[in-house]
Amino acid sequence: MNLHSKKRKFIYLFSLLIVSFFIYAYMYTLVPVLENKLERRIIDISTKDIINTITKTVRKNMTEGDFLLSVLYNPDYRKKLKDDLSIFLSKRLKNIFLIYKDNDNRYRYLIDTKTSEDPVNLLFIPLSEERSILEKLFVEKKTQFEIHKEVSTIGITYYVPILQNGNIKSVLIADFSFETLQEIKSLISLVQKGILASSGVILVILIIAVYYFYRNVILKQRAYIDSLTGIYNRNYLEDIRDVIDLNRYVVIMLDIDFFKNINDTYGHQVGDEILKGIANLLKENLREDDIIIRYGGEEFLILLKKSRNDPEGKWSLQVAQKLLHKIREYKYRGINLTASVGLNLDTHKARNLIDAIKKADITLYKAKRHGRDRIEIYKEIKDSSKDISLAELKDIIESNQIVCFYQPVINIKDKSVLYYESLARIKYKDKYLSPVNYLDLIKGTFLYFKFTKLIIQYNLEILKKFPNITVSLNMSPSDFLNDDIIGMLKSVGKNIVQRLKLEILETEDVHNYNTLKSNINKLKEFGYDIVLDDFGAGYVDFYYLTEIDARYIKVDGSVIKKIPYNQQYYKLTKHLVRFCKDIDKIPIAEFIENEEIHRILIELGVEYGQGYYFSKPLSIDQITNRFPS
Amino acid sequence: MRKLLVIFSVFLYVFKGYPQDIDKSLKYEMKILERLVIDITGKKYPKVFFDGVGENKIRMIIRFTTIKMVNNISKADFVFIKNKTRKYNAIKPTIALDFASVKNCDFCIGVFSWRNGRPILILFKENLQKFDIVLPKEYKYYIESKKYIVGKK
């Protein structure tokens, strides 16, 4: 058991104790109050009738004259009243007597039914607990009763004001025996035991419920927390996806750059420590209201709560900048770290949380492609004719509405065609969309591989139909890791293989270099020509260059198009061409857009190239008409 | 185990019937009597002579109050009488513990008894003066002329 779980257990037990204590304290104060109320209610119910009858007897005997004076000075009247009241005396009703208050505020007997003597004017000494009741009676002029605690000679006493013309003339006092009180108390005790027993049962049920509730909460928490970093995992995302109010959050996807290299170089233990460190860094630099989730291996999803002053969530850009700055500053054992961020501010436009995350994720990949250690903000594509949804794309792919356009790679001296680069297009709203418009939407999904397979299939058909042409296919590294695609390529006949080149794009991080290298080299052995695409634009070119036996190397267009007016690019191209030749590779220049570039490339000794100067991508019929073999 | 059982049985036997809590009314009465005698005599441990008072009552008074019992009335600070007659004529302030004893008691400064389940205390104005007894003002309620009492029960 680790310290964290011990602490949690302690908190849980402590909370349970506190709850139990409060329940107990509540019951402890509630039970006597209930008992008291019940006691008084039972007494009232069981004695009220007899008291009413006694009171009626007194009232029936009242004359028109002053009651007090009549009783005080008329012994016969006194005797009659006493005789009438004596009837009510019993084992339970022990004493019935009348008192009055004299001019010195002292209470004196008028009639006492208990004795044969006539105690008129004898001092009545109330018990100390009775004094306040009598005072109250003289103020409120209402019947009172008291359960005696000072003495055991009497149990319950009723004090009934005898009113005449609104004035209290006398007080009728009726004492019930202590035994009567005991009987009532034993009855109450039974009820009390019942209440206590049921309270006990309720308490036990409550404790069990609280126990299971906390157990459930803790189990849920465990299921939601990533054991390595201590932040939420994707299970939590599943739980909140349908309940979260997206309008109140900005979605940030943050990915540690080149994390695989760190794992490969320093080992997984160091990688894990870095992940923990980054998670802590995020926790320290974000608020409690923000939700941090470990989304993938080194990918963190942050749901940043918008502030009231910033409903658009623009402030999140500053937060993301701060996080990147902190990550740059964070150096675990001197290892420099950077991260890329995809920011989705338009969460209100997303269909749901997953959609909003997907958009942030697409933007994160954009940040990766554009050089990493940067923030990219998701932008809705304004051109609605190009704004294709995933559902639409799925329909297009599944109904195979895919075509390929072809751009010739030409010998720039004699203008003969080396091969045609196949460029995939989908037809959407009367326009042909290039993969840049939709590829990110399906990257990593089964649709992406289906798409690749359809392109391969399409080109195989073209090659069969046009036996004199050679084409190249653009393949991403992940395509070479897909067994189905590898199998498909290996099932192609040798005559076709000789006319099919595979261009490796550098569009994504690769985590399994060994398999990639092995699969590419197997295809090479199978007869495919390998072309390294976009050389000079990425970061892992040299790996491909050294580990993969490519025949052609395409110098990236971003380099080529600048050579007429930038000496650095001119020199870079010059040396790249020389370098390619030194290692026995054939350089191909991309983006030859004008005569000037064409001239310089000839001057630099480049043999092959492609670009709008020669031809833009065209349909197979157009291109074969334009460049007849 | 057997030893423990024996010790427990002995303990139960010894404490069997020990008055852990005396009757509430008796406690109330003892409190009143103790306070009354202390206030009358001005002594914390007043010496009292009991004349005609039952043995049980005396035992309770001695046990639950600071009152000390003396067997010689001349040594007493105070006298409690019951059962109508006062055998000794020594001039000592006296409280009757029943109404019947009041009539023929010249030295009675008051009466303490129970009526309708309540203690009743009445102090005689004339006799208090006779003994030069000045009581705190809380006693005002209880002070009456003896005339009111004689003949009543």
Image (tube, rainbow, N blue to C red):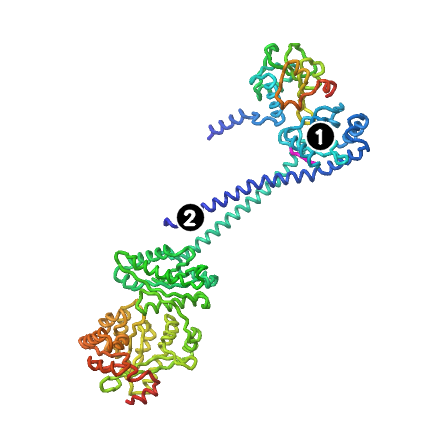
User: Is A523 left or right of A2, judged from the image as shown?
Assistant: left
- The 10 Å Cα crowd at callout 1, few under 14, some 14 to 19, many 20 or more, is many
Numbered mark located on residue A94 in the image: 1
Callout 2 and callout 1 share a chain: yes
Q: Is residue A524 visible?
A: no
Q: Is A144 covered by the magenta stretch?
A: yes
In this orientation, which residue lies closer to the viewer: A500 or A283? Answer: A283
Judge whether A337 appears above or below A406 on screen: above
In this orientation, which residue lies closer to the viewer: A261 or B93? Answer: B93
Q: How far apart are the alpha carbons under marks 2 and 1?
A: 62 Å
What residue is at 46 percent from the left and 51 percent from the top?
A214
Chain letter behind tag 1:
A
Q: Secondary structure at mark 2?
A: helix
In this orientation, which residue lies closer to the viewer: A340 or A311? Answer: A311
In percent of width and height, residue A208 lies at: 50, 49
Judge whether A345 appears above or below A284 on screen: below
Q: Residue furthest left?
A: A582
Q: Secondary structure at mark 1?
A: strand
Label 2 sits on what residue type?
Answer: Lys
> To which residue does mark 2 refer?
A9
- The 10 Å Cα crowd at callout 2, few under 14, some 14 to 19, many 20 or more, is some
> Chief secondary structure of the magenta span?
strand
Q: Is A73 covered by the magenta stretch?
A: no
In this orientation, which residue lies closer to the viewer: B132 or B63? Answer: B132
Q: Is residue A425 visible?
A: yes
Chain letter behind tag 2:
A
Label 1 sits on what residue type?
Answer: Lys
**Residue extent of the magenta highlight:** A143-147
